[in-house]
Amino acid sequence: EVGEMRIGCPGFRPCLVVLQVKLNRCDSNLYISMKLKAAAEIGICANHIRLPKTATEEEVLRGILAVNEDSAVHGLIVQLPLDSIHRINIQRVTQCIAPEKDVDGLNSVNAGKLARGDLTGCFIPCTPSGCMELIAQTGVNIAGKNAVVIGRSKIVGAPMHDLLLWNHATVTTCHTMTPDLPAQVSRADILVACAGKAELVKGEWLKKGAVVIDCGINHIPDRSRPSGARVVGDVDFPSALTRAAFITPVPGGVGPMTVAMLMENTVKSAKKFLKAFQPGKWPIVYTKINLTVMESLFFKLICFSHDCSDGEISQSCAVKPISSLSSEVGLLSSEVEAYGKSRGKVQLDVLKRTEALPNGKYVVVTGITPTLMGEGKTTTALGLAQALGAHLNMNAFACLRQPTHCNTVNVTGGGYSQIIPMEEDRLNLLVASEIMAVLSLSSSLEDLQQRLSKIIVAQPQSREPVTVKDLGVAGMLNMILKDAIKPCLMQTVEGTPVFLHTNPLCDIAHGNSSILSDKIALKLVGPDGFVVTEAGWGADIGLEKFFNIKCRSSGLQPDVVVMVVTVRGLKMHGRVPSVTEAWLLPTKSSEENLQLLEVGCSHLRKQIENSRAYGLPVVLAVNTFSSDTGAELDMVCQQARLAGALDAVCCTHWSDGGAGAVALGMAVQSAAETPHSFNFLYIQEKITVIAQKMYGAKDVVLSTKAMEKVTLFTGQGLGNLPVCIAKTPLSLSQDPEVMGIPRDFILSVEDILANAGAGFLCPLVHSVSLMCVFDTFLG
């Protein structure tokens, strides 16, 4: 069988681990050597883990957990007794063994299945299994026979009773305290002795012609032996030999069969693993969502009270324990700190463990300039991740910004494409601070401390800037943030894994989730998997900062850009030049008006042009509503393809979950395979290039104050940093009231801030107010 497995999967070998607390016990060492030798003879890889006699119970449990989480190991046995100088709870130890690797059948899951007769769905303890095989070799039919088991241990006696019972014998269990033991034995057609008492059963007790299986291993004094002792069983072999039809010798009887059954269980476990094994695929179980009638929910969405319906959906969905989810995606238990049952913080050590593994495909979701009704980027990102994972059988991770308690709406998706439980996804930090941007752009604790040290806290006119390092508090800040730097693991309604981590603003910062969450996720999904992240606001702002700030800092290169759009949003861009006027006419956006939509598509074409400026394929995702007509959807998709989008698809993930984004998932898969070469937008002349290429500005004008800052920061060695332009997200221009595609406007830069810790300069455009920053701090 081992050879057959190798033919089907070259290089594959079943693997068995024997864990022993080392003490000089000759019997234990003999059993282990027999097992290792037998494994080697049939091609099983066998490893012997020796713990010192000083090992504590916790150290034994940690050793078992490490084997449980090693996918290359298919069988684990703990050699009993555990001869430690410390007290060890054997029950806790056996319960710690993963049932699917418990080839000794000692875990309560396997014992419970055996007790209720589920003989094919469990591992049967090796010694009782070997005894059954020996009985079968005699040719005696067990059904209807009287069977007596002397011994009631969990390792042999109790499971032996169950096995005989489920093979239709009438079974009596006895022990050394049974008062009429000879009388009980005399009625036995089949006797299994496993009491652990030397030569307890005498030959005259036996029924003539009985089958006797002696499991005892006992040492009695024998001066004729070099060791001074010899091994005997629980049955007096010479006297029993005259009455029993069949009897097993000790040694040489049950022992070798026990080893053989251990090998059989290990091979069985390996075959089961190989049957379910798909190279590079997670063993993840996705949650089937219960799609309810959605008409009322659509009505609530249109009426701007969709939080209620999102909450109802969140409450109705089952949440997988965080321990199960983390195990499914390849995280070790030591790498996840559980915060309740549904979320956990992931240790950064996972990056060291997975350092040599290749990255997966990297997808960034962006959108048109958002209207006040929203376009659904986050919902689309989650729907895409669900489609890739639960419906297209790819390893898929979503990485999003973590909302704060200041958020008044749910910004982690909606409908059947949201993160659950929605009440546990909030962040407690101040999002407007440079510290949040630093946290988001850090790649390790060491990098975090270096960035914190560079934060400028004061800028005297005639001297060098005063930094956090100068104040001597960088180490203290680092300690405060030692837990905040760990990504938060949660899940979608379909059980797709999600990292929620950091939430820098998208005006005075870059508006993307953390580099660390992306890096960890890219390693976990593997080379064929997908990581879906989101850039804040529209492609002109959030996507530009994602590429030119985040990707410069991380060194990661995306593969696909997904542009999210809604028909109603494009109508608002095509209807009137004023955001305020468009806001007053939201209901008319549901009326079919192809001419108005065509005008709005000019804005779509500009944002697709912005997205394609980085050399990556662009896929359009039309977030559809029930009010959208076929003609409108066809026009949007056609206009997107004419503008250079590789593909354009309609999605219904809000109402249908991942199933509503399958077409999008397939388009993204295809786009990721197309040849592409990622490039940054600028090297020099940063502000002008962004303003002209992304916003469509005619020119850029810097105020006297801004020009002084350019001179100052250049002299301080900060001139080579990327820029993070703080501009209104509601328009391509600096005027939040102007929609569509503004033309011939001048971008006015009033001031420039130096976020040296985060690693970028922040030009402040004329219309931007920093009051939100002070409000956040005061709050």
Image (cartoon, grey):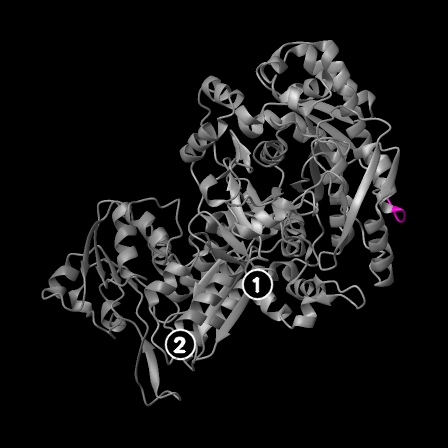
Residue depicted at 32% across the width and 90% down the height: 223
Residue depicted at 61% across the width and 52% down the height: 3
Residue depicted at 81% across the width and 39% down the height: 748
- In the rendered structure, which amino acid carries the disc numbered 1? Lys
Q: Position of residue 761 (x, y in %)?
A: 77, 52
Q: Is residue 279 visible?
A: no
Residue depicted at 48% across the width and 39% down the height: 420
Residue 27's disc is 2
- In the rendered structure, which amino acid carries the disc numbered 2? Asp
Alpha-carbon span between mark 2 and mark 1? 49 Å
Badge 2 or badge 1: first in the primary sequence: 2
Describe residue 734's horizontal placement relative to residue 45 as left or right: right
Residue 482's disc is 1
Q: Position of residue 574 (x, y in %)?
A: 73, 18
Towards the viewer: 700 or 320: 700
Spot the residue most to the left: 179
Q: Is residue 562 visible?
A: yes
- Which residues are the magenta region? 681-685
* Position above or below: 675 against 517: above
Q: Per the image, is 683 magenta?
A: yes
Quarter of the rendering containing residue 481: bottom right
Within 10 Å of disc 1 (Cα), the crowding (few <14, some 14-19, many 20+) is: few
Q: Position of residue 388 (x, y in %)?
A: 62, 35
Within 10 Å of disc 2 (Cα), the crowding (few <14, some 14-19, many 20+) is: few
| SS label for mark 2 | helix
